Image: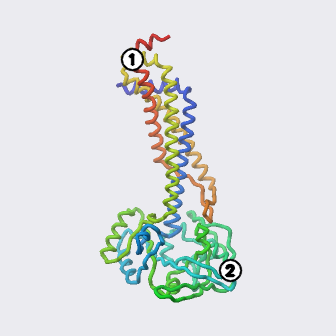
Amino acid sequence: MNAKLLLSMSLRNVRRQGRKSVGTLVVMAVSILALCLLAGYTQSNVELIQNAFMRWGARGHLVIERPSSQLAREVEGAGQNPITAAMQSDIDRVLSKDADVAARARILRISGMVSNARVSTIFAGIGQDVQEVRRIKGPAYEYDVVAGTPLWQETRAHPLVLGQGLAAILGCEVPKVGFAPAQPGQTPASRPMRCPPGPLELMVSTRGVARINATQALPTGIMDWGIKEINDRLVVMPMAEAQALLNTREISEYHVLLADGAGLDAVRDRLSAKLKAAGLDVTVFRWSDRAAFYQQFKAVLGGFLNFIAIVAGIVGFTSLLNASYMNFAQRAREFATLRSLGFTRRFVMTLTALENSWLAAAAALAGIACALGVTWAVRAAKIMWIPPGSSNAVPVEVAWVAPVYALTLAGVVILAALASTIPTRKILRRPIRSVLSEG
């Protein structure tokens, strides 16, 4: 089969017959535009949620805990046994010897009552290794307050960062701004923190025995965690302060950040084996294993993307099939003439498949080009919006998704070739003499 002849004839026929398929091309281009934009929007939002958990929430890549039940293995925060001081020493030794561990931070969950001279309310929060948490958050997320100073910059004794809602309940002036990650070279906005004079009093039930302990702390920063319900109860303090308040040396969990390029599952399995060999009753979870919001969010967007991809495929295929029937039926005598000149059925079918493929490729490239333009415009506009359940604005972004562009182009070309075979086979089944004798 002469490939050069096929390419030449198919391109010539497309130029001659292509105007008949303009409507089909427009429908396909719009479908491809919608699919590519949705794929970019999905990837951008999934990456945003990943950063929210791994960086902003300082979860890192891995979480080391002691689940107390099967439920605790499936649901985060559902009853974890504390990690003792002796176990911490062994865990630190294992983590410090692993080259793929870039940072590790201890976390201690705390809850109780917080009060000042005016009001008393419930709090729930964490004590943390401040500098290690800063390393996990990275430059974009380390300045994690919307007013006051972050813990890693604070030099005053007994510092305490409050969630926006809790700060408002306690009478502080809360700026009506949400947290936004710092861009490269950007200096985060610094705002003064104004609260009623005097320290806050935090009261908790201590670990191990039914006793009450209390301490005083100075509110030094206001944090926007991103979820209103958390902001209304949130406190964050240095690890030493939290352990002193709970009268314990125990912690709740470790958050571990891996080095760039480290294989998440491989490192998790290796650390699990080393910790088990050291006789430690702990479990190493991936950051996403029990991140219910992330899993649900990803499933919803993924399902919607798959639905749109199926609809776009069906619309594209039926449009191409309809255009192929209309176009090729009118050219039955042309195909019969080619066969009478010695060209095979296979040649004619390949010719029509190439013609459809050229048209489909043109529609796909037009749709992808429009998607690239819209993506650039959205990214340049820097539009912000507040999602349901969020306390701060997030960017409306569309990611560049080169693999989706390539797969879409290839998929459309394959659909076009398949759509051409159905009418062409039907036409070629007719005898040559019968077709040529038609007036």
Q: Which amino acid does label 2 sit on?
A: Cys
Q: Quadrant of residue 174?
A: bottom right
> Along the horizontal axis of the image, is 229 left or right of 337?
right
Q: Residues within 10 Å of mark 2 (few under 14, many from 20)?
A: some
Q: How crowded is mark 1: few (under 14 residues within 10 Å), some or many (20 or more)?
A: some
Q: Name the residue under label 2.
A: 195
Q: Can residue 49 be seen in this view?
A: yes
Image point (52%, 89%), residue name: 211
> Along the horizontal axis of the image, is 243 left or right of 221?
left
Point out residue 26 in the picture as x, y percentages from the top left corner: 57, 35
The answer to whether residue 260 is above or below residue 154 is: above
Tell me the colour scheme of the image.
rainbow
In front: 80, or 151?
80
Q: Mark 1 points at which residue?
A: 339
Image point (40%, 26%), residue name: 349
Q: Do the residues labelled 1 and 2 touch (CB within 8 Å)?
A: no
Q: In the displayed orientation, state which residue is furthest to the left.
A: 277
| Disc on the earlier residue, 1 or 2 | 2
The answer to whether residue 435 is above or below residue 193 is: above
Q: Which amino acid does label 1 sit on?
A: Arg
> Along the horizontal axis of the image, is 345 left or right of 330?
left
Point out residue 56 in the picture as x, y percentages from the top left corner: 53, 67
Image point (51%, 65%), residue name: 53
| Mark drawn on residue 33 | none
Point out residue 135 in the picture as x, y percentages from the top left corner: 48, 72
Q: Is residue 256 visible?
A: no
The answer to whether residue 368 is above or below residue 298 is: above
Point out residue 95 in the picture as x, y percentages from the top left corner: 37, 74
Instruction: State the SS at label 2.
Output: loop
Alpha carbons under labels 1 and 2: distance apart: 90 Å
